[in-house]
Image (cartoon, rainbow, N blue to C red):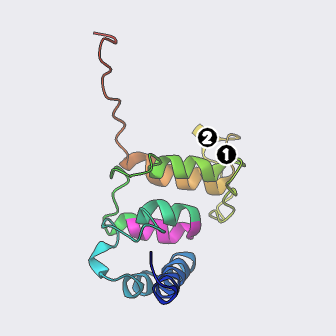
Amino acid sequence: MPTDEERCVEARVFERIDAAFRDGNLDALRQAVEDPAVVPNGRMPDTIGSCLVYAIYHSPLAFIRTLLEIGADPNAPVDDGFPPLIGALCKVREVPGSTRRTDGDSDPRPFSSLRGLYPRAGRELFLLLTPMISVHVPPTAGWAR
C-alpha cells in the first residue's frame, strides 16, 4: 500500500497532466508525464488511461486534432474496452455519466450526412475520428460461415 506521501505525489502528477489536457497544451502535457515519448500513444498513468480517449473527454477539439496530427492512433487497443470512437459517441449526445461537447466550430453550415442527429461539436469530433478508424469485427466461432 502506498504511503501518504506517494499518493500525494501521484495526485500532483495527475493534476498537472489533467490541467495540460484541459488547457490543450501539448508542451505542458509532455512535461507533466514521466516520459514525453508516451504522448500520444504510449502508456499514460492508470488514472489517465489512453491519451486520445482522455483528450476526447476533457480537451478542446483543437488539441484532439493536434494529437491526431502527431500520430495518436484511434485504433490502438484499450484496456477498458472503450476505444476513442466510443468516447466520441458518448460526447456527442447527452448520455448518463457524460456531458455533451459544446466547443464546436463557429461555421454555421451543418454537415448534411449528420444533420439533426448530433450537436455541431459532436459532429466535428465524430468526423475528425471517423476517417482514421478501422472497424474490425472478429469472427465468432460457429457463426456465419
| Residue ID at (33%, 34%) | 136
Q: Residues within 10 Å of mark 1 (few under 14, many from 20)?
A: some
Q: CA distance from mark 2 to mark 1?
A: 7 Å
Q: Which residue is mark 1?
A: 118
Q: Is residue 24 left or right of residue 36?
A: right
Residue 66 on image: x %, y %? 42, 70
| Residue ID at (54%, 66%) | 61
Residue 53 on image: x %, y %? 47, 59
Residue 54 on image: x %, y %? 50, 64
Q: Is residue 20 left or right of residue 70?
A: right
Q: Is residue 103 left or right of residue 55?
A: right
Q: Amino acid at mark 2?
A: Leu
Give the mark toward the camera: 2 or 1.
1
Q: Is residue 30 left or right of residue 90?
A: left
Q: Quadrant of the N terminus?
A: bottom left
Q: Which residue is mark 2?
A: 114
Total labels drawn:
2
Main secondary structure of the magenta stretch? helix
Up/down of 63 relative to 137, above or below? below
What stretch of residues is rendered in magenta? 58-67
Q: Secondary structure at mark 2?
A: helix
| Residue ID at (30%, 23%) | 139
Q: Secondary structure at mark 1?
A: loop
Q: Quadrant of the C terminus?
A: top left
Up/down of 44 relative to 116, above or below? below
Per the image, is 111 magenta?
Answer: no
Q: Residues within 10 Å of mark 2 (few under 14, many from 20)?
A: some
The reply to whether callout 2 and callout 1 are in contact (CB within 8 Å) is yes
Residue 19 is drawn in which quadrant?
A: bottom right
Query: Which of these two is toward me, 53 or 71?
Result: 53
Q: Amino acid at mark 1?
A: Tyr
